[in-house]
Every structure is written in C-alpha cells, then in structure tokens.
Image (cartoon, rainbow, N blue to C red):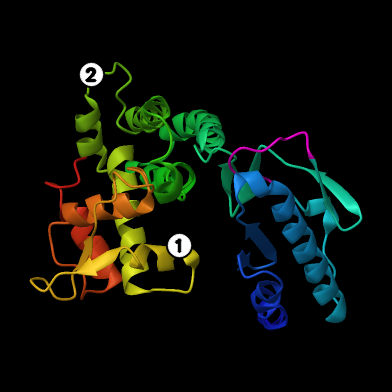
C-alpha cells in the first residue's frame, strides 16, 4: 500500500521543477506516466525543440538526484499541428521521430486532434466483442447479459467520449452507433431486425450512443465546475465563464463560436450542454446529478 503513496511523494515536485526551466511548459502526471507539453509558434519550431531538450535534461537530472531513472525505450514524442514528421528530435543523447499519435491514459491523440485513430481503435475493439456477446446471449439470462454488455462493451465504447466523440466525423459516429445497435439486437433477440433503434433502446433499457456521450459530457462539465483544479484546461474554461446577476451562482457560458475556439471546442460544448440540462445543478451532489440526468428522458433522447 505504501508504494503508490511513496511514489507520489517522490514525484510531486516534478511540475514545479520543470516550470522553473520553462514557464510555458504544461505537465500532466498520472501514476508513473508523465506527459510534458510545450507550445510554440509554427515559425519557431527550432526554439520549441530546444525548450523540450532542456526540459528533458532537467527531468533526467532531477530523477537521477532522487535515485530514479527514466525508461527511454518507452519515451514517445509527437507534434500537434503542422510539423515535418521526418525531422529527428534530439533529446539528450537519443534521437526520436515524431509519432503520428500518442496514447494518453488510453486515448489516442493524433497530430490533427480529429481522433480518427482512436475511433477506429474503439470500433475494432467493439467488433471483436460482438461475437462473444452473441454467444453469451444464448446462455446468460437477460439481467446478467446486460451487466456483461455494460462492463465489456459500453465501457470501451464510451470511455473518455467527452474528449473525442465531438471531434470525429459523422460517418464514424454512425458506425459507433451501429456497433451498439448490433449488440442491442442480440440482447433483444431481434435477429430479423423488426425493431427500430428507438425500440431497441426502450426494450433493453440501454441508451443510444448519442445519449450516452451527451450524459458523459454533462458529468465532465459537472466535475469541472463543482471540483475546480489547477489544470490549464479548467483555468481556460473558467476564464470564459461569466456570472449573471439574474442567476447568481449559475455558470453562464459565453458564445465563442465565431472566435478562435471554434464550435467544437470544450467551451462551446459546455455552453450547449449547460443550456440542455433542464434543472438547477449547481448545488447538488454528483449522485443526485447523475440520477436526474438519467430520468430526464425528454431532454436526453434515447
């Protein structure tokens, strides 16, 4: 039990150490994974690479001083935006090539941030699970089969969907919805395809993929507003929130759709979701919030 605690104590100063080297650095650490990001102008890529090199050296020196080591074989580098992938990145005495995507806590972030690679990975995983669910469909009673479906299929389908599902194209969204509808037909024994998608959701008491991802975004919004952290994402979100005198304590999200953030940004998605929630959610607990979301059928269509 002391292992994770001691590791956190050892590594808690890492963000402060790296921020002293470069003020523009962002550090995300989870367990033994550490992600370091540096933003730079597209015309100043070389200076950005120099900053990364200094950060990497500072990281290695700090780990060496506390008796730890970095696994260079598991070190990966990627560049978001316009970048020449054939350009070698030198970190310390080792060269790296920018990868087309990088996995962060199970989510594939590609260079264009359109999450096509991650959606394709999810579709492949769901496809491999369809046949086992079809076989178990003949053996298990409906309540147990429903639990297995949630645990081994929907959990993969909707994992971190609040991050990636609004950045993929409509074609991939339709394929993900179709993957869920396929296993729902197994669950409902609708092999002749006589039921509509809405009837499948009603009979199985399982929401559609579109409804599930909207609910996940609502939960993310709730946690961001009620449990603010020091993450840069939360700071940027709150910097674009105003409070109306008419609704004290109720976050009002500005419409930045015509600004640089774009319609698909988290700020505008949060604004739309906040307007969709049909009840006051600023002074309730997370379990009550989730329960009211699930019962708001008129707003979150199956």
Range covered by the magenta-colored residues: 77-87
As drawn, 217 above or below 135: below
Label 1: few (<14), some or many (≥20) within 10 Å? few
Q: Earlier in the sequence, mark 1 or mark 2?
A: 2
Looking at the image, the residue that sits furthest to the top is: 192
Mark 2 lies on a secondary structure that is loop
Residue located at (62% from left, 53% from top): 40
Q: Quadrant of residue 57?
A: bottom right
Q: Quadrant of residue 242?
A: bottom left
Decide whether residue 79 is among the magenta residues: yes
Label 2: few (<14), some or many (≥20) within 10 Å? few
Question: Percent x, y for residue 214?
Answer: 29, 47
Q: Assign the N terminus to one quadrant of the image.
A: bottom right
Q: Single out the mark in the foreground, 1 or 2.
A: 1
Mark 1 lies on a secondary structure that is helix
Task: Report which residue position mark 2 lands on.
Answer: 194
């Amino acid at each position: 039990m002391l292992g994770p605690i001691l590791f956190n104590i050892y590594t808690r100063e890492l963000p402060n150490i790296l921020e002293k080297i470069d003020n523009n650095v962002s550090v995300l650490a989870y367990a033994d994974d550490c992600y370091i990001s540096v933003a730079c102008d597209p015309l100043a890529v070389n200076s950005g690479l120099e900053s990364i090199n200094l950060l990497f050296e500072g990281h290695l020196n700090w780990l060496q001083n506390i008796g730890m080591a970095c696994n260079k074989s598991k070190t990966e580098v990627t560049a978001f935006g316009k970048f020449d992938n054939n350009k070698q990145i030198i970190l310390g005495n080792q060269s790296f090539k920018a990868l087309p995507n990088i996995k962060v806590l199970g989510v594939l972030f590609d260079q264009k941030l359109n999450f096509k690679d991650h959606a394709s990975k999810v579709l492949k995983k769901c496809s491999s699970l369809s046949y086992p669910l079809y076989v178990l469909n003949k053996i298990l009673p409906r309540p147990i089969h429903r639990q297995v479906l949630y645990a081994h299929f929907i959990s993969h389908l909707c994992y971190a969907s609040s991050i990636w599902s609004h950045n993929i194209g409509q074609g991939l969204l339709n394929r993900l919805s179709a993957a869920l509808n396929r296993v729902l037909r197994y669950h409902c024994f609708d092999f002749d395809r006589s039921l509509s998608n809405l009837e499948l959701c009603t009979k199985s008491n399982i929401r559609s993929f579109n409804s599930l991802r909207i609910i996940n975004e609502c939960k993310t919004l709730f946690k961001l507003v009620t449990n603010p952290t020091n993450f840069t994402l939360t700071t940027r979100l709150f910097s674009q929130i105003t409070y109306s005198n008419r609704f004290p304590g109720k976050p009002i999200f500005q419409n930045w759709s015509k600004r640089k953030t774009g319609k698909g940004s988290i700020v505008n998605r949060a604004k739309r979701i906040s307007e969709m929630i049909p009840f006051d959610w600023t002074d309730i607990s997370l379990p009550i919030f989730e329960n009211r979301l699930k019962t708001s059928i008129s707003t979150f269509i199956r």
